[in-house]
Amino acid sequence: MVNLTSDRFSVQALAALQLASRIAGRARAPLISSGHLMASVLQQRDGDAYGVLVALGHDPVSMAKQLVDLFGSRQIILGHNAAQGQLDSSLQGAFATSFAEAEAVGSPFATTRDLLVGVLDSPDHELAELLAVWQIDRNAVSQAPVSVYELAATAVAAQKQQARQAKARAGWRISPIFLGLLAALLASGAWLYWQEDAHPIAVFIFVTLGWIVSLALHEFGHAVTAYWGGDYSVEERGYLTLNPLKYTHPLLSIIMPVIFLLLGGIGLPGGAVYVNMGAIRTRGMQSMVAAAGPAANAIFAALLALPFLLNGDSVFYTDRPAFWSSIALLVFLQITAIVLNLMPIPGLDGFGILAPWLPLSVHRMLAPIYSFGFLLLIFLFWYVDAFSQFFWDAVWLLILQLNILPDLVAFGFNLYRFWMP
């Protein structure tokens, strides 16, 4: 019995053997024959055998069709005794020849051309009838130069595994851009802390860097939860690297956040990640994906506010007002981002949390305004006093719960907008 382990075949040859088994099964043949293997080899367009036959003036597509039609016209009803991966004597002889052909040229594995030579030497009776018509020159096939050089199946499998591992490492590697931003944030914060009379520009730099870092954390929260939920495409898009450049969108990432920050001092997370909700396993997980962004903001805000929570005496920040007011402003921006994003308005995370549970009829009714969620938000802020009042009441309530004085936030905001009188 011929040893048919995968390491003895090229990728195309191994695929041809697997296809031969399926062809035999469909024809309800008792054994896999050299004819079945010939039909499968003729269909491997990226294989050496296909290229050699074309170069010799044959038509592999037409030849494969003739063989398959022949099998179909000679079906034998065998029930459960149809081909079970067993080889007939013609195919065993074909494999022996194939391996001898490979060994003759110093190859440790057989290619589709070696298989072709083997079936030409050991055809079954059905294949022999067609070979008499096709007139394939066995020696010409064996000696013809090839333009496609097949690789061993085991080598390709190892290459694919290495590529997957490298891709996984790259997909989860923290971006140097994020690390640089984090280092710059810490350096500017340290400079603010040790300078008794820091220039407002330093506050602007520190707060802006902190805001960009929080933006990356917000979008990373969405992405990593989506990955856990089943959407592995976020890894391919680079969303798991914390690189803010991967989350950018001209309108959502730049224009809208700047407008909101300058007009109202609101922290609007402006990143944009595409999540394939169809790949997320459950509705509950889809809601968690939407909630993960605000949750990341909440964690970041809690870490920044920790000194205020641990020190009940507000006098501790009077020695370094620029630094502590900058921290207070960053916390304030996180809180506004959390409250704003949890609003059940299309385009915001609050709506994303509810969306998986809404009936299709509600989605159809709201579809016309899905693209105008931010415009609706601006309208509510400018023209609906109750909405604006609710928003600011919620923000300041949370700020006070974190033991941060509103006056400190206001002072930080004045330093941040140093260009205004």
Image (cartoon, grey):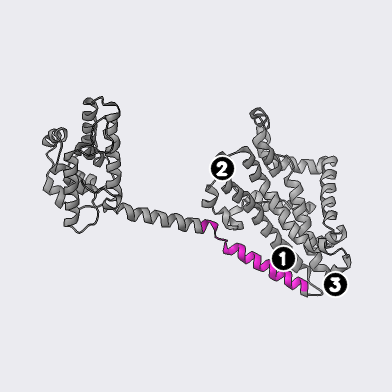
Q: Is residue 13 above or below residue 204?
A: above
Q: Position of residue 379 (x, y in %)?
A: 77, 41
Q: Position of residue 85 (x, y in %)?
A: 27, 38
Residue at screen point 42% across, 57% down:
162
Asked whether disc 3 touches disc 2, contact meaning CB atoms under 8 Å apart, the reply is: no
Considering only vertical position in the picture, is 209 above or below 342?
below
Task: Compare marks 3 and 1 and give the one earlier in the sequence.
Answer: 1
Q: Which range is magenta?
A: 170-193
In this picture, residue 247 sits left or right of residue 346: left
Identify the mark nearer the N-term, 3 or 2: 2
* Lateral position of residue 235 relative to residue 106, left or right: right
Give yes or no for residue 192 being in the magenta stretch.
yes
Q: Which residue is mark 3?
A: 319
Residue type marked 2 = Asn
Label 2, on which residue? 276
Q: Amino acid at mark 1?
A: Ile
Q: Is residue 64 visible?
A: yes
Element type at mark 2: loop
| Nearer mark to the viewer, of 1 and 2 | 2
Tag 3–tag 1 contact (CB < 8 Å): no
What kind of residue is marked 3? Answer: Asp
Marks 3, 1: nearer the viewer: 3
Query: Which image quadrant: the C terminus?
Result: bottom right
Q: Which mark is residue 88?
A: none
